Image (cartoon, grey):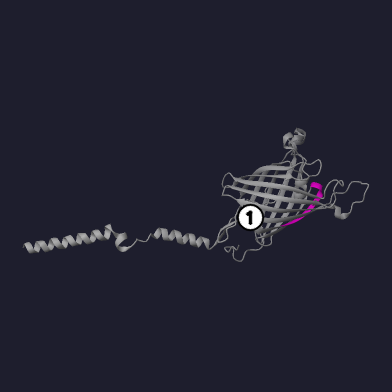
Amino acid sequence: METYQHKTSAKLFWCIALISIVYLFPHNAFGQTPDLFKMQDEQDKKDAKEKTDITTSIFKSTRLINGQTIENTGRGILDLRISHRFGFVNTGSYNFFGLDQATMRLGLDYGITDRLEVGIGRSTFNKEFDGFFKYRILRQSTGKVNMPISISLAATGVWRSLKDTVTTFPINYSDHFSFSGQLILARKFNDYFSLQLVPTMVHYNIVPTKAVKNDLYSMGIGFRQRLSKRVNLTGEYYYQVTQLGGYTNSASVGFDIETGGHVFQLFFTNSTGINESSFITQTQGLWGNGGIRFGFNISRVFSVVKPKNPAKTTY
């Protein structure tokens, strides 16, 4: 009887010892247990590095207020734009604080590719016709291609059809043209804030005097601050490094409101003209004495050519 009890006790002892070794010393005796969650995180990071995630919606429209943004109209998309500015607020109650007067531009922009956009427009200011193209050189992205900023090139040509005043010198047809070239550098810092810099050169085929240079340089800056899901605070300022006499820098502030298929912009600006050569170098209003205009932009997009594979995005 004692022998049986001793054998039972011995078996129980060795079972307890074996269980203790397995559970108390797994790392030393059998190697480290794999961490499946850690392995999955590492695989996800590896997969993310193998693809490129392009940053979108740096700004909500192809125009910030007056000037271009880094954004392009998508491939096969036609953008109908109506830009409207009332008169100067400081004209008083007789002109209903500017609402009796108006300046406007009607434009059509089209996306030839996801990188290339072209557009035409007609402004009542100086009865100007304009045409432009904008090409996206680099796109902000993370992953396989890590690009911290987006860069675009924009070029605009303007023809002034307003009849000339009588002068003592002949004015040629080509003298009615002006041109602008812009390099747009932008970055979306997060879902709430975006910033862009726009070094610009405006060229006039004819200038008032020999003392004025035909090429005028300026630096633009613009921002977007998200306030809610559909409302953004926007602003832009163009500092003229070289300027025409009697004109000042363009400054504007407003709101972008997304409503279904279009973006509605409300703002105040001291500029009358709407194309680049007009608002950058020919702004006369002063914010300090009420020389500002209330205005709005309406953008309505139409799909002209449906993409063959809308889910596919290439860098």
On the image, the x and y values in percent for residue 160 come to 82, 51
Q: Residues within 10 Å of mark 1 (few under 14, many from 20)?
A: many
Q: Nearer the viewer, residue 184 or 210?
A: 210
Q: Residue at x 62, y 54 (%)?
A: 149
Q: Residue at x 66, y 55 (%)?
A: 151
On the image, the x and y values in percent for residue 278 come to 77, 47
Quadrant position of residue 80: bottom right
Q: Which residue is mark 1?
A: 150
Q: Which residues are magenta?
A: 125-133
> Vertical placement of 238 versus 41: above or below?
above
Give the residue type at disc 1.
Ser
Relative placement, left or right, of 13 versus 33 is: left
Relative placement, left or right, of 159 versus 259 is: right
Magenta-colored stretch includes residue 254: no
Q: Main secondary structure of the magenta part?
A: strand
Quadrant position of residue 112: bottom right
